[in-house]
């Protein structure tokens, strides 16, 4: 089976840095993705790591360690608009189906 | 705006009924995915189509079925509806169907009463 663990909630203040961790157990592994979802909205793709290491896209970075079955999403210079749910998702095969974690609710305070 | 469209936006129906949810992928995307999001189950993969053919199946109930048409739009049919089927149903698309970025539509919120 597949399981992904991520914290249910994280809070931070504007301008701060926050890290959301994700550990996974899957029978097959084809990359770790991160998605953002605002209340009532659609998930929006943030990043994808197929290989070990850090990927940086603007204020967001994502890291993967395949040997540790672990990854994280790093959000820098937090803004109020970053308040949302963040999901890690694992590709379990080359077919594209994704297994999602339960999501981390990030609240950014002024 | 991801370029993926879904209709209807909201749907309220009674137990035992049948509904059809519609999805149009981004222009040029061959692969369509259906996901169900509920409070107790989270975001769950249901089924994937690629260029008209079923490619992968997840935890999709036998009461649910889907298809992808020659113009690449897709429909998800839910029948004999139960209260527990109330959820947000998302369609996503991607160019080739491999892992990586998927583009999600705005979703259809289904309420079964």
Image (cartoon, coloured by chain):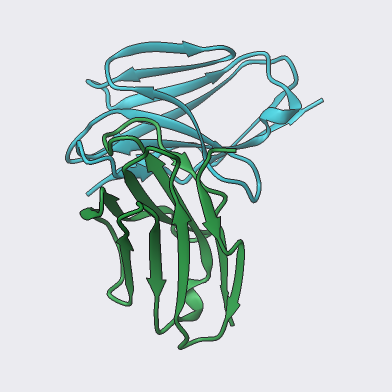
Chain colours: A cyan, B green
The location of residue B113, given as percent across then percent down, is: 59, 83
The residue positioned 48% from the left and 23% from the top of the image is A73
- Count of residue discs: 0
Taking the image as shown, residue B101 lies to the left or right of residue A40, namely left
The residue positioned 39% from the left and 11% from the top of the image is A54
Frontmost residue, A84 versus B79:
B79
Farthest bottom residue in view = B16
The location of residue B78, given as percent across then percent down, is: 40, 74
Quadrant in which residue B74 is drawn: bottom left
Frontmost residue, B33 versus B61:
B33
Frontmost residue, B99 versus A86:
B99
* Quarter of the image with the C terminus of chain A in it: top right
Taking the image as shown, residue A103 lies to the left or right of residue B80, namely right
The location of residue A4, given as percent across then percent down, is: 36, 40
Examine the rendered structure and indicate whether residue B20 appears above or below residue A33: below
Farthest right residue in view = A110
Farthest left residue in view = A27
The residue positioned 50% from the left and 42% from the top of the image is A103
The residue positioned 26% from the left and 35% from the top of the image is B98
Taking the image as shown, residue A101 lies to the left or right of residue A74, namely left
Examine the rendered structure and indicate whether residue B59 appears above or below residue B64: above
The location of residue A81, given as percent across then percent down, is: 72, 29
Quadrant in which residue A23 is drawn: top left
């Amino acid at each position: 089976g597949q399981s992904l663990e991520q914290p249910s909630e994280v809070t931070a203040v504007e301008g701060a840095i926050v890290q959301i961790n994700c550990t996974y157990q899957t029978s097959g592994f084809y990359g770790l993705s991160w998605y953002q979802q605002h209340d009532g909205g659609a998930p929006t793709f943030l990043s994808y790591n197929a290989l070990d290491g850090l990927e940086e896209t603007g204020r967001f970075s994502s890291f993967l360690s395949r040997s540790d079955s672990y990854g994280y999403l790093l959000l820098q210079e937090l803004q109020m608009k970053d308040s949302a749910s963040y999901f890690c998702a694992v590709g379990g095969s080359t077919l594209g189906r994704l297994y999602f974690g339960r999501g981390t609710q990030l609240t950014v305070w002024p | 705006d991801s370029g993926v469209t879904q209709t209807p936006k909201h749907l309220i129906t009674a137990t035992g009924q049948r509904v059809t949810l519609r999805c149009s992928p981004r222009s040029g995307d061959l692969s369509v995915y259906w996901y169900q999001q509920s409070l107790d189950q989270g975001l769950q993969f249901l089924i994937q189509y690629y260029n008209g053919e079923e490619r992968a199946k997840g935890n999709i109930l036998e009461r649910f079925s889907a298809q992808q048409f020659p113009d690449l739009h897709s429909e998800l049919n839910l029948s004999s509806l139960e209260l527990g089927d109330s959820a947000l149903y998302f369609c996503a698309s991607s160019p080739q169907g491999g892992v990586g970025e998927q583009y999600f539509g705005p979703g259809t919120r289904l309420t079964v009463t």
